[in-house]
Amino acid sequence: MVKNFIEELRWRGMIHDIMPGTEEALNKGVTSGYIGFDPTADSLHVGHLVQIMTLVHFQRAGHKPYALVGGATGMVGDPSGKSQERNLLDETTLLHNVACVRGQLEKFLDFESGDNAAQLVNNFDWFKNMSFLDFIRDVGKHITVNYMMAKDSVKKRLETGMSFTEFSYQLVQGYDFYHLNKEHGCIIQLGGSDQWGNIVTGTELIRRKGGGEAYAVTTPLIKKADGTKFGKTEGGSVWLDPEKTSPYQFYQFWLNASDADAPNYIRIFTLKTKEEIEALEAEHNAAPHLRILQKAIAEDITIRVHGEEALKTAIAASNILFGKSTEEDLRSLSEKDFLTVFEGVPSATISKSDFSAGLGIIDALSAKTGFLASNGEARRELKANAVSVNKAKVEETYELSEKDLINGKYILLGKGKKNNYLIIID
């Protein structure tokens, strides 16, 4: 054993509920456990990172992690934490989502490490040939309706109503645990605290149907110090897919963490040791304005999810906002990242024909855009060496041309360090 898994989660603040005997069972030797991921989208988001990191710690402690992608349960819909029934997805969409999620999990878990290599399983494989009659005979008879009705996920929905489909979800998830216990020796299921009811249904089914022992650990649901929902921005969820959330936006999400949230995030979302974290905290507290903790978190997680090159681009894009950048940094950005960085910056559109006819810097600053109030102001700022084109200082005689276009259509004008203006050639 590399280390005590439960002890590792405990000091990181990653335990909400734990079934008695769990730590002792895990300390007896290498064993197997799993977490389920719901493939309702073709990408995981930062909210899933808590569970991903839980599996990472499980594997680093010498145990064998199973990541269950719920191709079958995704067709049913988990009522836990939901106020209304969600739309169900068709099989083709779900299988596509499963494949995408699999690729993202492979960035975190070692699937080739020998005895404790991670393994990916899809519950559609064992449910696809099971008939309804088989299910209610072999599974349903072991769990009473009274037991199912007592679950919070059910009680909270009784007033508004819930379908039999959702009511049966805990049995379906419980059978997953039973199947993995029987076929792969999984003795522990891990998950978020909202999954406790579903998980213990599984431990009960294993006890009643198979006569075996099983255990459960849940992690706290992450809440931001200001009360807003973790993993959400004005633009929606923060995804692991770079097409949905660019590496720059992803990096910025962590960089913008509050000082109150950062100590929690660095424990949960990075693999830094207790000593490393405490040293970073001391450094951060000595100079909070440098945002040392936030930078450490953002760099660590962005590298793991998107790689080192993407991190370099994200840092370059972030530096642009603080005036510490070059034209090379601007040109390194994709059009999507470029527009994200300069979202909200005033802009003007100039036709290709007008641009091709020639555009001097003075006209570009005033008459054609209104960035500066007049030609006189434009000349004064140019003489003061305060005007830049794509972050490079220019003089009164400068003529804008094709070579200045970024991504084939943008030119960034600047006055001083903080005033930017975007010209769009269309």
Image (tube, rainbow, N blue to C red):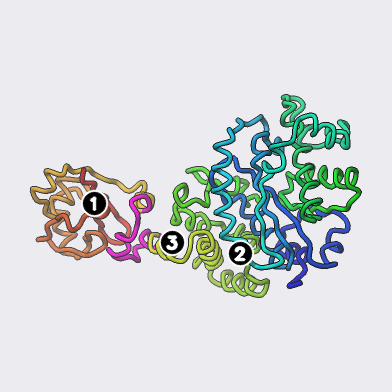
Q: Amino acid at mark 2?
A: Thr
**Image quadrant in which the C terminus is located:** top left
**Image quadrant in which the N terminus is located:** bottom right
Q: Nearer the viewer, residue 185 or 221?
A: 185
Residue marked by disc 3: 310
Q: Amino acid at mark 1?
A: Gly
Q: Amino acid at mark 3?
A: Ala
Q: Give the spatial CA distance, label 2 vs label 3.
A: 18 Å
Q: Is residue 92 above or below residue 178?
A: above
- Do the residues under discs 2 and 3 have CB atoms within 8 angstroms? no
Label 3 vs 1, first from the N-terminus: 3
Is the stretch drawn in magenta largely helix, strand or loop?
helix
Q: Residue 331 falls in which quadrant of the image?
A: bottom left
| Residue 337 can be seen, yes or no | yes
Q: Viewed as shown, does residue 144 lie left or right of 168?
A: right
Q: Give the spatial CA distance, label 3 vs label 1.
A: 22 Å
Q: Which residues are magenta?
A: 318-337
Label 2 vs 3, first from the N-terminus: 2
Q: Position of residue 320 (x, y in %)?
A: 35, 61
Question: Is label 2 in a helix, a strand or a loop?
Answer: loop
Q: Residue at x 55, y 46 (%)?
A: 232
Q: Viewed as shown, does residue 415 lie left or right of 117?
A: left
Q: Position of residue 275 (x, y in %)?
A: 66, 75
The mark found on residue 408 in the picture is: 1
Question: Is label 3 in a helix, a strand or a loop?
Answer: helix
Q: Is residue 278 above or below residue 348?
A: below
Residue marked by disc 2: 270
Label 1 vs 2, first from the N-terminus: 2
Q: Residue at x 82, y 67 (%)?
A: 29
